[in-house]
Amino acid sequence: MTREKRRAGGELDQGRLDAIVARAHKDATTRMRGYREQSLRLYPHVCARCGRTFTAANLHELTVHHKDHNHDNNPPDGSNWENLCLYCHDWEHQKYSYAVKGAEAAFGLTRQAPPAVTAEATHNPFAKLKDVLAKKDKG
């Protein structure tokens, strides 16, 4: 915990304290202009997919998802946003990745599709089952 520096007489430096408070207010205003804060003000603190409810203690686990996957599309009415928990948000991006050419992408980033598997499986775990059962019946 940071301690405020005091003047020689034990008093707080009021000018410095005022500057800290002013900077904190400015930073809060800047943060509130972000789309996450706007979405949290517009929509309830509930995941739009699974219905999980969030409180101040776990609100950091609630994310804002861009419905059209375009992070530059931030209308002030929030029509392109939905609040999703971390798990639903990850799933949404994975689902989107598979729908877009280049499956196996991580978190919405597509890669070149892996080559198709053409060889058939050669291992048969039940190949000798008949012999084993025949031995058991004889013994």
Image (cartoon, helix red, strand yellow):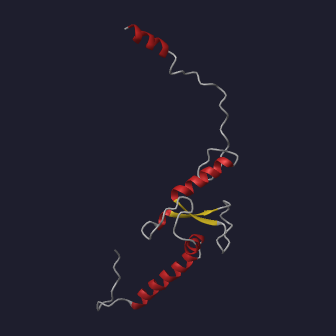
Q: Residue furthest front?
A: 137
Closer to the camera in the image, 118 or 40? 40
- Considering depth in this image, is 11 or 66 the residue closer to the camera? 66
Determine the residue positioned at 45% across, 85% down.
21
* Residue farthest left in this picture: 9
The one of 139 and 99 positioned closer to us in this rendering: 139
Q: Could you say which quadrant of the image residue 116 lies in?
A: top right
- Horizontally, residue 18 falls left or right of residue 92, namely left
* In this view, 55 is above or below 100: below
- Residue at image coords 44%, 65%: 58
Let me know if residue 109 appears in the view: no
Q: With respect to residue 58, does 11 lie above or below?
A: below
The C terminus lies in which quarter of the figure? Answer: top left
Q: Quadrant of residue 9?
A: bottom left
**Residue sitting at x 50%, y 83%:** 25
**Quadrant housing the N terminus:** bottom left
Q: Is residue 1 visible?
A: yes
Location of residue 86 in the rendering, given as x and y in whole percent from the top left corner: 52, 58
Q: Is residue 27 above or below residue 97?
A: below
Residue 138 x, y percent position in the rendering = 40, 7
How far from the left and from the top, in percent, is residue 89?
A: 56, 57
**Residue positioned most to the right:** 101
Total number of numbered discs in the rendering: 0
